[in-house]
Amino acid sequence: MSPDTPSSEQVPLDQLAERLVRRLQKRSWSIATGESLTAGLVSSTIASVPGCSAVFRGAVVAYAPEVKTEVLHVPGELLTQGIVTEEVALALAQGACSRLAATVGIGTTGAAGPDDHDGMPGGTACIAVCGPSVQRARTLRVTGDRSQVRHAVTQAAVEAALEILEVGE
């Protein structure tokens, strides 16, 4: 997918997470996250919803490259090509699904800023979501400080998971 910016619609994260948890419950699906850039903010957002334990399997915060490869089984050759890529985000999502036995996986990677990371400018992020017979990844360009970038990427990741759940509805 082409680079874009997160939704300009500012739905509070707690409302998005509530919708996500309810949709997962409706389908009897589960979710897990493999997070780098967001450092657990996606999983924390999901976990803030009462009743999430029925669908939330867990999360791996994989900042270090060796955690990505050893815990989430991201292929090392992907990381040598660059950590801030849609392919790495998808591998993080797939690794979370596989390792945590979830139906849906979310992966996040990127450069929160202010400095460049892996040759990518601060505010560059890749998110991915995988589910039964569907997977999506996209690159985002976000402005703001580290906190604002992490928040916007978390919002985009939860919105992407909601999109996956709408497939076939």
Image (tube, rainbow, N blue to C red):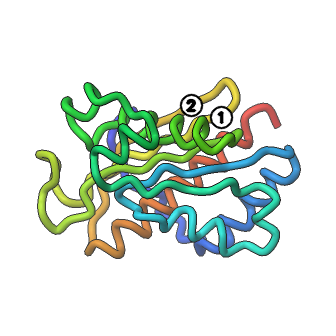
Q: Is residue 96 left or right of residue 124?
A: right
Left-right relation of 7 to 142: right
Marks 1/2 in contact by CB < 8 Å: the verdict is yes
Instruction: Give the tally of numbered discs.
Output: 2
Q: Name the outermost residue toward the front.
A: 70
Does residue 73 appear left or right of residue 33 in this picture? left
51 w.r.t. 129: above or below = below
Image quarter hosting the N terminus: top left
Name the residue at 47% across, 65% down. 40
Above or below, comparing residue 50 to residue 88 in the picture: below
| Image location (x, y in percent) of residue 64 | 28, 52
Residue at x 33% of width, y 42% of height = 3
x and y, in percent, of residue 108 in the image: 42, 50
- Residue at position x 27%, y 43% in the image: 84
Give residue 164's position: percent from left, percent from top: 66, 40
**For the residue marked with disc 1, what is the amino acid?**
Gly
Q: On the image, which quarter does residue 131 sit in?
A: top right
Residue identifier under label 2: 135
Which residue is more in the foreground, 101 or 38?
A: 101
**Circle number at residue 27:** none
Image mark for residue 131: 1
Q: Quadrant of residue 163?
A: top right
At horizontal 20% and vertical 65% (from top left) the residue drawn is: 113
- Characterize the local packing of mark 2: few (<14), some (14-19) or many (20 or more) Cα atoms within 10 angstroms: some
SS at badge 1 = strand
